[in-house]
Image (cartoon, rainbow, N blue to C red):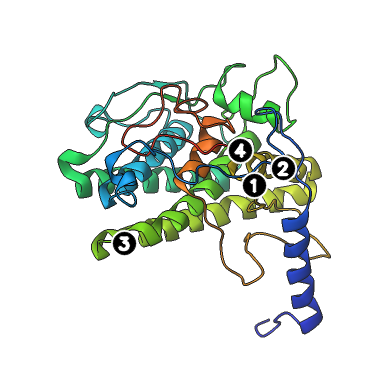
Amino acid sequence: MLGNFLTRPQAEDVMARRAERRNFMRRTSGFAAGVAGGALVAACGGGDNATAQAGGPSDEDILNFALNLEYLEAQFYLFAATGAGLGANQQTGTGQQGAVTGGRAVNFTDPVVRQYAKEIAGDELAHVAFLRKALGTAAVAHPAIDISASPTGAFSTAARAAGLIGPGQSFDPYANDENFLLAAYLFEDVGVTAYKGASPLVQNKTYLEAAAGILAAEAYHAGLVRTVLYSKGVQAPALRTAADAISNARDSLDNAQDVDQGISPTNDVSNIVPLDENGIAYSRSPGDVLNIVYLNSGAVRSGGFYPAGVNGSLVLSSALA
């Protein structure tokens, strides 16, 4: 019934749980040597571009960075839900246009997961179209994207680093409902923190409102995916453990701080919404985000899900010493 709010001891448990998660010693994930204990050197990618040198990225730089991320999410969800990716008219623009590698429809057995996949696919397609329209002729082209199930592909590299699979094995995000959810989980929390981190940099109020709107949509997506994983994990604890391992792997890459949280409960309190002690979502810089999607802790310009890098001026990942 309504009105069953947290008691003060329960609220204190939540705060303690978040503090515990933030202080948890992150294990080295194996993405690259020397990640643990590193210090953030470059908070924002593209340090050699004019706008960054002039005091920060422009609004167009930020929106184009977001567009690169939306290309990735749209391709993954569209293939998983429909078996086909973005149309050719949604891939043109400035910079080097690349193809998408991999991707196929998931044979969903859970009708709820299937419906969620279709809904998110439609949302991500709309995000791509919206950002391309907002940017006009300044929109960057679709970069080369790897969403394959190959043993050497980005998903398998990420899963191997998280300890989900062994050497030479592959992680197929399209094999079943659970694999799809874990792959979606890999992306969604990153998207939320990326928009949260970029929003304060946007100067134009119209663009800022748009970024805030997409941030809200991505947060809904992340909450949805985390909720379903948590629910399924009640009956299959290994699934929840796998999600936590992905969280730890992400957190070992982005920067020297602990800004990622899994979904396992602490003190009988769930962790669907990953927040700090003030109940506020975390932020990631563009460089932090590129560390994760490039699957590399060094200052690099390509790798992982973007074999040839992203398009635009924000292309350089952060370096952890």
Q: Residue furthest bottom?
A: 3
Measured as percent of width and height from the top left, residue 31 is found at 65, 29
**Closer to the N terminus: mark 4 or mark 3?**
3
Q: Mark 3 points at which residue?
A: 208
Contact (CB < 8 A) between labels 4 and 1?
Answer: yes
N-terminal-most mark, 4 or 1: 1
Name the one closer to the observer, 292 or 79. Answer: 292
Q: What residue is disc 4 on? A: 320
Residue type (three-letter) at the residue carrying disc 3:
Leu
Task: Name the foreground residue: 70 vs 258.
Answer: 258
Dot 3 or dot 1: first in sequence order is 3
Q: Is mark 1 on a helix, strand or loop?
A: loop
- Most extreme residue toward the left, as rendered? 137
- Label 3 secondary element: helix
Residue under the point 71% across and 28% down? 30
The mark that comes first in sequence, 2 or 4, is 2
Report which residue position mark 2 lands on.
Answer: 37
Quarter location, residue 227: bottom right
Q: From the image, state whether disc 2 or disc 3 is nearer to you.
A: 2
Q: Which amino acid does label 1 sit on?
A: Ala
Whole-angstrom CA distance, mark 3 to mark 1, is: 28 Å
Q: Which dot, 3 or 1, sits closer to the camera?
A: 1
Front-lying residue, 128 or 250: 250
Name the quadrant containing residue 160: top right
* Front residue (pair 1, 103): 103
- Determine the residue positioned at 58% across, 27% down: 155
Q: In this figure, which residue is indicated by the disc labeled 1?
A: 256
Q: Which quadrant holds the N terminus? A: bottom right
Q: How crowded is mark 3: few (under 14 residues within 10 Å), some or many (20 or more)?
A: some
Q: Which quadrant of the structure image shows residue 165?
A: top right
* Image quarter hosting the C terminus: top right
